[in-house]
């Protein structure tokens, strides 16, 4: 790489700045603003909702609202305009787009044994969003493409385009192991602060990771589960349990679920 490009990249990174991830304190590179990420998150969410109808069963929607409300209060992210929707599809996945736009597919709902497991997955996805993993991934891919194309083609339009591509397809791409571990950690703390028993997270990933490793499972293709994940969660369980113990309203495992419906 030419010296001038290296210099320009360094200057760009310095000007755009680093941010510290809430709850973990890790420094990250971000070339996009939270406002622009949230705007793209909102428009992508509208597209998802236009393509896939909401689940008709009001009990499922009400349960997700209840869990979402608790996780939202624990996350305390002022720049988000939260929305929680169960979408009617056999897809076994869930996501949270930038700005707090959460969706859980009915195919995913069927995998939960109880409300706390739903909280675990919602809190994990919210963890990716408050840590701005999408923006961070796009920032690195933007830097790489500037390095490839040369700085002459750099402009705000290029950055915008790179970010749009990242946010359009990024949600269904696997996150890095580093981002997965961080979302697990943030998610575990959020669900505990929200009053859900954090042991449910370890139980869920143990069961989901071992018994259901079909490639058809979208959640596993975007969130690969292995022994590292369970070990990482177990290592932070004591910390999570102290947050849970300090919580005024304890929900425990919450409602029992069967076929995606609260019993
Ligand atoms: Zn994840």
Image (cartoon, rainbow, N blue to C red):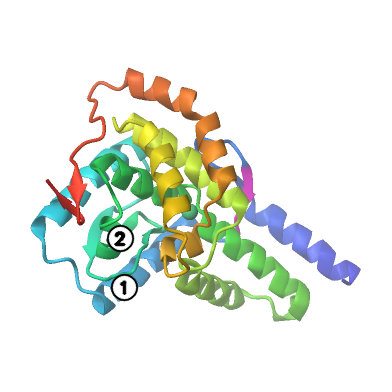
* Residue at x 23% of width, y 60% of height: 85
Circle 1 SS class: helix
On the image, which quarter does residue 103 sit in? bottom left
Quarter of the image where one finds residue 260: bottom left
Measure how far apart labels 1 and 2 are at the Cα level.
Answer: 9 Å
- Relative side of 141 to 224, left or right: right
Q: Is residue 29 part of the magenta span, yes or no?
A: yes
Neighbor class of circle 2 (other Cα within 10 Å; few <14, some 14-19, many 20+) is: many
Q: What numbered label is drawn on residue 48? A: 1
The residue drawn where x is 9% and y is 58% is 58
Q: Quadrant of the N terminus?
A: bottom right
Q: Check residue 64 for magenta coloring.
A: no
Is residue 110 something that shows in the picture? yes
Residue labelled 2 has its Cβ within 8 Å of some atom of ligand 1 = no
The mark that comes first in sequence, 1 or 2, is 1
Q: Residues within 10 Å of mark 1 (few under 14, many from 20)?
A: few
Q: Which mark is residue 144?
A: none
70 above or below 145?
above
Q: Are marks 1 and 2 in contact (CB under 8 Å)?
A: yes
Q: Height in image: 250 above or below 162?
A: above
Tell me, for residue 103, which label it has, or none: 2
At x 31%, y 59%, the residue is 108
Residue stretch rendered in magenta on the structure = 27-31
In this view, the residue farthest toward the left is: 58
> Could you say where residue 102 lies in the image, as x and y percent from the top left?
32, 57
Residue 168 placed where, x, y %?
46, 73
């Amino acid at each position: 790489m030419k010296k001038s490009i290296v210099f320009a990249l360094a200057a760009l990174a310095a000007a755009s700045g680093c941010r510290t991830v809430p709850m973990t304190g890790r420094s990250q590179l971000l070339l996009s603003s939270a406002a622009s990420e949230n705007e793209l998150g909102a428009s992508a969410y509208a597209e998802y909702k236009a393509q896939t109808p909401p689940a008709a069963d009001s009990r499922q929607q009400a349960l997700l609202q209840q869990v979402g409300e608790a996780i939202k209060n624990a996350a305390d992210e002022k720049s988000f305009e939260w929305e929680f929707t169960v979408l009617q599809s056999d897809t076994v996945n869930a996501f949270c787009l930038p700005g707090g736009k959460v969706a859980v597919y009915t195919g995913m709902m069927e995998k939960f044994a109880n409300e706390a497991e739903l909280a675990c997955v919602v809190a994990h996805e919210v963890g990716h969003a408050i840590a701005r993993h999408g923006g961070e991934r796009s920032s690195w891919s933007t830097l790489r493409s500037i390095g490839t194309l040369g700085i002459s083609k750099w402009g705000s339009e290029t950055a915008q385009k790179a970010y749009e591509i990242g946010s359009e397809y990024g949600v269904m791409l696997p996150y890095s192991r580093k981002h997965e571990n961080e979302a697990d950690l943030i998610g575990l703390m959020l669900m505990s602060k929200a009053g859900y028993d954090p042991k449910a997270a370890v139980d869920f990933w143990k069961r989901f990771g071992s018994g259901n490793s079909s490639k058809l499972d979208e959640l596993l293709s975007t969130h690969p589960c292995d022994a590292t994940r369970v070990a990482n969660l177990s290592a932070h369980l004591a910390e999570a349990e102290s947050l849970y113990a300090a919580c005024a309203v304890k929900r425990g495992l919450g409602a029992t679920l069967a076929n995606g419906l609260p019993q």
